[in-house]
Image (cartoon, rainbow, N blue to C red):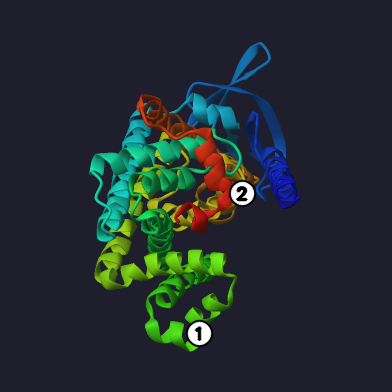
Amino acid sequence: MRKPLVTALKLLVLVGLFAWIIANIQWRDSIQRTAADESIVERVEGRIVGAWDRAVVHLAVGEETQEFKIGPIQGGGHIAVAPGLLTYFRQLDLTWFVLGALGYVASMAAASARWWWLLARNGIHVRMRSALRLTWIGVFFNNFVPGQTGGDLVKAVYIVRQSPGRRVAAAMSVVVDRVLGLGSLALLGAVVVLFDVDRFGWLALGIWAVLLAVCAIGVFAFSRRLRRALGLDALLRRLPEKFAAALMKVDAAVFFYRDHKAGIFVWVVLGALNHVITVASFFCMGEALRIGVPPLEYFVLVPIALIGSAVPIAPNGWGVGEALFGKLFGTYAAVHVGPGVPDPEAVMRTRGIALSVLYRLHTTLWSLVGGVMLLADRHRLTRAELDAARDEGPPEVAR
């Protein structure tokens, strides 16, 4: 009963998110003439012919094409252009797009290296090539397999199968890797947001709260005194024997990293640098769409949107990501739309959603690499293995 209820709630949230997204997208191209008080005097809808970000824009209205000179007009007011969603994609700058795509591949390689290091510290020696392959296969499952068979679960089952004597440590390496990635992302956003606290005040509180929560998890996991004061071992022993044994194995696997605190710290910092590449990839995608937002906003808004997109509601964060990018860019980046636009937040919401859709589509295409690797794997997982892992949960998978 519980699983159908959770699935129904997820679908309900997803429907609500997509309804909000659809309602907040500007679908049609338009030219708007405003008065000196920024009220709309005239709005002409059609299809932009040629580039939309030029001093003179051509708009096809019915069978005729009209020419508009964008900018201030005599007597006050402005003539402004507001492209529809599809126009941004139609006029995509391929050079910037390719740069962004290469940045994504580089960040994937760095993330694979972090997981490979975590495995090695726990005495699980796999080749870097194998860690990279499993990472790509995990990305494929995140994008194309609905339900609860996520990429992290697939990576965990694969590595557990390859490490029969280190099952708990192998499975928990995936969890620790995810926490390190979250901490690195929060660290990047927490540092950059300090450059403009007045503007990003509430966001600063949120991102610092996430960072402090990750730090608290680390302190709790690695501090013998705190664990003793809280009576963690005694608490685990009071649980049913089977459940307690599984949790104690998980606890021991996580506590093992206590002897590698320096390495963990280094990888959190290196992870933040890796996320610089990720954000730079988003920036390149934004330039490809001609969003017109400076780098600072990307380094504040993108980490927050990515952390929020990690909520497991839909494959690859679809819906959640678009809502977050639209809301964040519409609220905090509308100042960069330019003068004379009657509703700059609506324009920037559309651009933020366009950025999220473009990035998610391109990562979905990249994930096909993982699909090819899965097909080429002679020992790929069976459905029975995945179903068993999903039903048992992390502690039992790692047994």
Q: Is residue 189 above or below residue 140?
A: below
For marks 1 and 2, give the one nearer the viewer. 1
Q: Is residue 106 above or below residue 258?
A: above
For the image, the number of numbered tags is 2
Q: Nearer the viewer, residue 349 or 248?
A: 248
Q: Residues within 10 Å of mark 1 (few under 14, many from 20)?
A: few
Residue furthest front as drawn: 241
Residue 67 falls in which quadrant of the image?
Answer: top right
- Kind of residue at disc 2: Glu
Give me the residue at 51% from left, 71% from top.
209
Identify the element where label 2 is drawn: helix
Residue furthest top as drawn: 63
Disc nearer the start of the sequence (1/2): 1
| Residue 212 seen from this side | yes
Give me the residue at 69% from left, 37% from top.
22
Give me the residue at 48% from left, 41% from top.
291
Percent x, y of residue 80: 58, 37
| Residue 340 seen from this side | no
Q: Nearer the viewer, residue 90 or 130?
A: 130
Q: Nearer the viewer, residue 92 or 47?
A: 92
Percent x, y of residue 265: 29, 68
Give me the residue at 38% from left, 51% from top.
295
Q: Which mark is residue 345?
A: 2
Please state, as top left, top right, bottom left or bottom right, where the C terminus lies in the image: bottom left
- The residue singled out by tag 1 in the image is 231
